[in-house]
């Protein structure tokens, strides 16, 4: 039994997650009024979706097939890229309403450029300054976007 | 006659100075993002959203549409020269385009790509101008049943056709539909799946979700990459690009078939360019007298999918503009821009704003002519652009994407949504789920629920109403046939595998 599951790990995990998501949708749906088929409440359609998810997950489990390594793992080792780009977006989100667009863009671009190991700190800083100033020029001065540029 | 008048009206919009300028800007940008691997159409649209609010709706749509079909042209350049598809729809072109380039026929491949793209596009535009008006007229009679059935068919087709893992795709669609429901239910005022956060009351931001799922992985993988300069391209002269008579002859029929296949899958909401390119490639391989050449530089292998891809892109405007059903996320953004400018998507758009519809149609013609010029005599520029310092371009894109997404609602939460969906999409891919069906479900979720509810109100809770109304019944019947087909095929495969497994154990 254990060997059976291990061989089919890929499909079994996918099936279990699908069922779990389905159950989650169902519990949420039952929190809202279901209503009847003629007068549907806000919970009815989500309930149908939850049932579908559970059924699909069950089918995945029942018909689990061996093998099937993930195909997308070839580029998986780019940890630096993941970390720096995530950090760039996070920095923008945290800074935009506190210190304004220009500093936020500066930090975001600086962090994002460091995701490539060949970019030097100086290049990153110069690129960040250039981008921040261009954004200020385009969005604040030219387009009059309602984002405050500085703190 | 009416058609001629309409086309003249369209021409007056599209050929005005503003129309020409924004069309040119759109197709040039489209070619640029198409050529550069890793910058998707969605990310580009997101970057430009702040600008479109300032434009007249006609010009805004002409520009956005230009990016959309311009990218369909440009995508094949990197596919052929680097075997690195610039857009998802041009992946198939690389199968035969790259071998051709290695044989020294890069010029011919690029030339044929441009010609096939033009043929496919024009076919799509002709269909759009012929069928949208009658379709919109019929659609005025559509009830919620027909709308629901159409979207159901679109989702089923998108999940099952061209996907090797049907059950996973269906699960992705279902989850997408549920994600589309996040926010306040308009009928009851109940906030669903919002977890008490007011930022979610208006639903998840489409741009943030789409870029999280598709754009973020691309940005991350491209930011770390250093592109090798493309092979020596100095010898791509116009003369070396001209295909031989034999190559013309071999490409003609594949282009015709590709256009047909592309237009069909493009017009069906849900399926689009990606499916069309794969199916037209498979068709040509099956019909060819020398299938062994496919994958080694068969010119049919680029002519067919390229025409299919572009026909699909243009045909995708048919359901979008005549029914108000967006066939893919890009179309949903276009409809969103229309709504920002106070135009309600649906069958009334064509009669209510004829200048917008026909202006768009004529701008497609003009835009495709621009694209021929950009992609034939000027192809050298785009080839050279492939060797720009990538690692310096991507941080700038991150900045513009940030501002673009933030400017839609001025909500910091949307940036977090983008990040969350980036990781979510990564997890889905790790378990071999596709993210495209999820996004489609997300786009159609609210419309589907709305029409489902209304259909059952008008039919007094009679669920059979989807089958008993003639038009809806035909569409529903087709969807059920597709489901039955895939169920039988799936069961048969599962049974035969299980039998094989048992034999192995016995042996």
Image (cartoon, grey):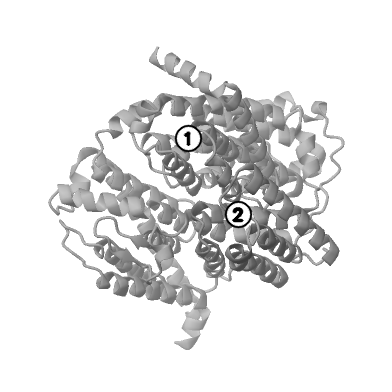
- Residue B183 lies, with reference to residue B243, above or below; the image says below
- Quadrant of res A39: bottom left
Residue B279 as seen in the image, left or right of residue A91? left
Question: Number of marks in the image?
Answer: 2
Circles 1 and 2 on the same chain: yes
The spot of residue B459 in percent (x, y) is 14, 48
Residue B417 as seen in the image, left or right of residue B105? left
Check contact, mark 1 vs mark 2: CB within 8 A. Answer: no
Give residue B315's mark: 1
Q: Chain of mark 1?
A: B
Instruction: Pick out the residue farthest to the front.
Output: A151
Task: Give the SS element for disc 1.
Answer: helix
Residue in the image at 50% along x and 60% along y: B411
From the image, which quarter does the N terminus of chain B lie in? top left
Between residues B468 and A126, which one lies in front from this camera angle? Answer: A126
Residue in the image at 34% along x and 54% along y: B446
User: Which label sits in the foreground, 1 or 2?
Assistant: 2
Q: Name the residue tied to disc 2.
A: B403
Mark sitting earlier along the chain (1/2):
1
- Quadrant of res A94: bottom right
| Residue B160 visible in the current orientation | no
| Residue A94 visible in the current orientation | yes
- Residue A118 lies, with reference to residue B450, above or below; the image says below
Task: Give the SS element for disc 2.
Answer: helix
The spot of residue B309 in percent (x, y) is 56, 39
Q: Chain of mark 2?
A: B
Give residue B426's mark: none
Instruction: Pick out the residue farthest to the top.
Output: B1
Residue A128 as seen in the image, left or right of residue B181? right
Circle 2 packing at 10 Å, graded few (<14), some (14-19), many (20+), is many
The spot of residue A135 in percent (x, y) is 68, 51
């Amino acid at each position: 039994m254990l060997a059976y599951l291990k061989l089919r790990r890929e499909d079994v995990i996918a099936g279990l997650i699908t069922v779990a998501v389905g159950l989650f949708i169902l519990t949420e749906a039952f929190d809202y009024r279901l209503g009847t088929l003629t007068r549907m409440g806000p919970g009815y359609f989500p309930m149908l979706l939850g049932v579908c998810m559970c059924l699909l997950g069950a089918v995945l489990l029942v018909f689990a097939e061996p093998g099937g390594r993930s195909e997308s793992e070839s580029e998986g080792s780019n940890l630096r890229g993941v970390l720096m780009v995530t950090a760039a977006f996070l920095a923008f989100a945290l800074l935009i309403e506190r210190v304004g667009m220009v500093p936020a863009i500066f930090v975001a671009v600086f962090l994002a450029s460091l995701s490539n190991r060949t970019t030097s700190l100086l290049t990153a800083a110069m690129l960040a300054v250039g981008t921040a100033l261009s954004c200020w020029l385009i969005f604040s001065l030219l387009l009059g976007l309602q984002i405050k540029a500085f703190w | 006659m009416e058609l001629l008048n309409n086309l003249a009206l369209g021409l007056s919009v599209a050929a005005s100075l503003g129309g020409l300028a924004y069309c040119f800007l759109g197709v040039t940008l489209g070619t640029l993002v198409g050529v550069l691997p890793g910058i998707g159409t969605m990310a580009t649209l997101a970057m430009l959203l702040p600008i479109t609010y300032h434009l007249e709706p006609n010009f805004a749509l002409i520009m956005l549409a230009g990016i959309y079909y311009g990218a369909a042209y440009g995508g094949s350049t990197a596919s052929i020269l680097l075997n690195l598809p610039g857009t998802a729809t041009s992946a198939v072109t690389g199968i035969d385009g790259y071998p051709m380039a290695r044989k020294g026929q890069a010029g011919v491949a690029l030339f044929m790509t441009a010609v096939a793209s033009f043929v496919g596009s024009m076919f799509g535009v002709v269909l759009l101008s012929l069928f949208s008006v009658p379709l919109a007229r019929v659609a005025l009679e559509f009830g919620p049943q027909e709308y629901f059935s159409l979207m159901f068919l679109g989702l089923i087709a998108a999940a099952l056709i061209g996907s090797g893992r049907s059950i996973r795709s269906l699960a992705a669609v279902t989850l997408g539909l549920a994600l589309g429901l996040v926010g306040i239910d308009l009928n009851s005022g109940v906030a669903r799946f919002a977890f008490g956060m007011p930022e979610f009351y208006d639903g998840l931001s489409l741009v943030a979700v789409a870029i999280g799922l598709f754009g973020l992985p691309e940005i991350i993988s491209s930011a770390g990459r250093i592109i090798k300069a493309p092979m020596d391209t100095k010898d791509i002269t116009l003369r070396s690009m001209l295909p031989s008579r034999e190559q013309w002859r071999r490409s003609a029929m594949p282009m015709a078939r590709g256009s047909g296949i592309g237009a069909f899958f493009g017009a069906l909401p849900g399926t689009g360019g990606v499916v069309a390119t794969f199916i037209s490639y498979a068709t040509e391989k099956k019909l060819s007298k020398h299938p062994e050449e496919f994958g080694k530089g068969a010119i049919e292998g680029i002519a067919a999918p390229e025409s299919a891809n572009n026909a699909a892109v243009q045909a995708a405007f048919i359901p979008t503009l005549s029914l108000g059903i967006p066939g893919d996320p890009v179309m949903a953004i276009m409809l969103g821009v229309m709504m920002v400018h106070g135009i309600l998507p649906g069958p009334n758009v064509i009669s209510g704003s004829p200048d917008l519809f026909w202006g768009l149609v004529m701008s497609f013609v003009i835009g495709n002519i621009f694209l021929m010029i950009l992609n034939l005599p000027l192809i050298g520029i785009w080839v050279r652009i492939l060797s720009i310092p990538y690692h310096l371009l991507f941080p700038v894109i991150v900045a513009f994407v940030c501002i673009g997404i933030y400017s839609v609602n001025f909500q910091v939460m949307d940036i977090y949504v983008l990040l969350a969906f980036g990781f979510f999409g990564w997890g889905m891919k790790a378990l071999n789920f596709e993210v495209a069906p999820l996004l489609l479900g997300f786009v159609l979720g609210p419309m589907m629920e709305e029409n489902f509810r209304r259909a059952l109100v008008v039919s007094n809770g009679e669920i059979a109403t989807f089958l008993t109304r003639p038009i809806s019944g035909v569409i529903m019947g087709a969807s059920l046939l597709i489901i039955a087909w895939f169920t039988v095929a799936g069961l048969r495969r599962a049974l035969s595998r299980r039998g094989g497994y048992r034999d192995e154990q016995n042996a």
